[in-house]
Amino acid sequence: MRHDRIQKSINAYLCRNVSHIYARLDIIQSISGLILAAFIIIHLLLEASIIISKDAMLMVSKFFEGYYFFGEKYPGIISFLAAAIFFILIIHALIALRKFPSNYRQYHILKQHMKQFHHSDTHLWFYQAVTGFMMFFLASVHLYIMMTQPANIGPYASADRIYTDWLWPLYLLLLISVVIHAGIGLYRLALKWGIFERNVHGNQKYVAKKSKINRQIFKKIMLIGISLYVIIGFTSLVSYLKVGYEHRDKAGERYESIEKEVQL
Amino acid sequence: MSNSQIASKAPKQARQLHFHILRFDPHLKGDKPRIETFIIEESPGMTLFIALNDIRRNHDASLKFDFVCRAGICGSCAMVINGKPGLACHTLTATLDTDISLAPLPVFELIGDLSVYTGNWMRGLNERLEAWIHQQEEHDFNRLEEPMEPDLADEIYELDRCIECGCCIAGCGTIQMREEFVGAVGLNKIARYQIDPRDKRSDADYYELIGDEDGVFSCMTLLGCEDVCPKNLPLQSRIAYLRRKMLQIGLTSVQDNCLCVSTPT
């Protein structure tokens, strides 16, 4: 018994008293953020198919229901995708919460610091924290609807949801917050891990200069990306609103059924 | 030459600089923080250091601020200039508006007015991070040192240029909220020893020092440090480098780093 205790204390001394969880949390936060950002980049482009035509949007929605693979529609695929994204979002939010100010004192200190310092990247982080907080609610509502009503995605179904069911204010806020959050997030990710910076030792003055130039380039890409996606997202939201407005008297009717009638 | 041309050639009237200085001495009983304004005339090539001496000589002899080298080497005169941390001796008044606000660096212990005790804080940091060369055997002073590649020596020297002025700490939003964070000055030190072949510590040893939420994983990449460092140290790229290195350790299994003997059951 006594020997056991001695052995234990020796082991406690020899064993590095460190936890690898911190490194893992950091990389999980980064990777989950990267996946979500990549998802949003594709998602916003696909839903913008409504700008082209209702048929283009129908094609996209049928594609994701597996119509072109199985010859039949399986909305369950959408449910599954939405659930997977929801899961990643929850993991990301849970881990990223560590970085939020944890009490009013910390929040107040940060606000004072920002007010005095006028430092753009500190402000960018704050915008990210605010938009991240907004998405706890906005993204959850959206994802829950997608999970539970996966079949209601289509030119008329989506437009009716946006116009008749009054989801456009939520989508507008979600669009702005998600684009800002993802844009700044990708920019910070690049600098946080120093992508394009080599692991080799080199002239530090050169490395420093290069990383400063990289940062300016990343910042430009971020600003262009955010503006572009806000424009694309906004235009498609207006398109859905237009379709929804025109279709308001027949809300609930599906676009495909009309298509079939015409074919008949 | 017309009159207007002559007028433009004449020396411009010197600007009147309004210094709004945060005054407070915690050691004086009953002293309360307040902003005091001093008006002085700008002279050519004037730095904040010269201006502060002018104020102390001609306006208020009790104004407290630090300086030693006047050349951006000692790091004593760091202060918050118009909200941004910087060295007083390095800052030309010509680059600032006529209204200049000065405040002591936050986080550090306040001695009085613009003077803070960075030395105490930095000593604590150096002890905590063991910021010195760790050798396995005792150093033999009679033996010639191992030669080092000039590029590597340059690289170490570049990171060694840190003057511990505290600007990166004052410019860091993370450390304002979480005082236990080691900050860019601490991470730069680890980056410096990590590349030094004379330091025999392994990456796993460094993980013990900075592999947690007070170390490299606390950094939120706000980049205030990078933007205010008066020595232009490559802080963003070195923190990213350490993050990658520490991640490699973090992704190995805990057993790999364990020297313990399995307990007999």
Image: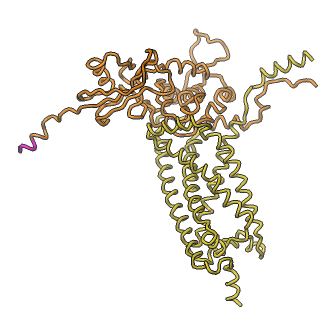
Residue A9: image location, x then y, percent: 82, 19
Left or right of A11: which side holds A210?
left
Is A19 one of the magenta-colored residues?
no
Residue B245 in the image: above or below residue A256 = above
Chain B representation colour: orange
Which region is colored magenta?
B1-5
Chain A representation colour: yellow
Viewer-nearest residue: B165 or B71: B165
Viewer-nearest residue: A201 or A114: A114
Residue A223: image location, x then y, percent: 48, 54
Residue A177: image location, x then y, percent: 57, 55
Viewer-nearest residue: B33 or A225: B33
Residue B148 in the image: above or below residue A65 = above
Left or right of A141: which side holds B69?
left
Q: Main secondary structure of the magenta part?
A: helix
The quadrant in which residue A247 appears is bottom right
Seen at 61% across and 69% down, the residue is A162
Residue B207: image location, x then y, percent: 67, 30
Say how many tags the image has.
0
Seen at 20% across and 32% down, the residue is B14
Seen at 90% across and 15% down, the residue is A2
Q: Residue furthest top?
A: B142
Left or right of B219: which side holds B69?
left
Seen at 77% across and 76% down, the residue is A71
Instruction: Report if residue A10 is visible in the image.
Output: yes
